[in-house]
Amino acid sequence: MAIGPVQLIVLGFAHPEFHGEIIAELERLRRSDTVRVIDALAVYKDKNGELEVEHLSNLSWNEAVELGSKVGALIGLGIEGEAGMEAGALLGAEAAAEGVGVFDEDPAWDVLDELPNDSAAALILLEHHWAVPLRDAVLRAGGFRVGDGFISPLDLVAIGLHTAEEARELHALEMTTAARGK
């Protein structure tokens, strides 16, 4: 079975109020075969910068330990404290030794370092099932991925996908939420 394109989405929360909506939406997307969650973690950073990691799924503890190493390997974090962090870092180092670049675009990006103290983040590793046929068609045509990213609502005004008012409202919501975390 071909694995679809995989994306790590990192979402910040100034004062998280997790009530299951995120997990429910990810489950809905899985049922529709749009995406598959390979791993999902909630990372809490207290006011002193200490981290607590929790899975955002209904996996058993053993499944969480096994699957949690996927995000851990990408960012050097494990779910079993210092030993897990070392295991995640080793997996990342092994991948680099085999020529696999982890976060090639910006090797200095430390997702957990960017998380402000007294806040949280959801790290969701998604496989995009919907994109497998498109990716395969691109490859058959000799194409390759050059880059990807989410576009700000403010940037969508210029091409007519948002009105200026809609974009300002969405941007203000995003910035207000982010500012609450400071």
Image (spheres, rainbow, N blue to C red):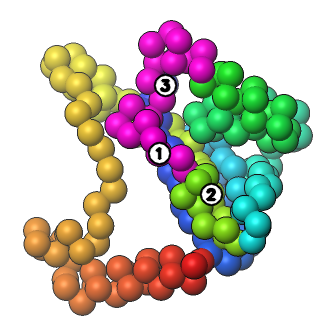
* Residue type (three-letter) at the residue carrying disc 3: Ile
The residue singled out by tag 1 in the image is 109
* Residue 170, position as x, y percentages in the image: 36, 81
Is the magenta region chiefly helix, strand or loop? loop
Q: Residue at x 45, y 13 (%)?
A: 99
- The answer to which of marks 3 and 1 sits earlier in the sequence is 3
Q: Judging from the image, what secondary structure is the residue with disc 3 in?
A: loop
Quick one: 100 or 65, which is closer to the camera? 100
Image quadrant holding the C terminus, namely bottom right
- The answer to which of marks 1 and 2 sits earlier in the sequence is 1
Give how far apart the Cα atoms at labels 2 and 3 are: 22 Å
- 42 is higher (above) or lower (below) than 94: below
Q: Quadrant of residue 51?
A: bottom right
- Give the label on residue 3, or none: 3
Q: Are marks 2 and 3 in contact (CB under 8 Å)?
A: no
Q: Residue at x 58, y 34 (%)?
A: 74
Quick one: 19 or 151, which is closer to the camera? 151
In the rendered picture of this protein, how many numbered marks are placed on residues?
3
The residue singled out by tag 2 in the image is 122
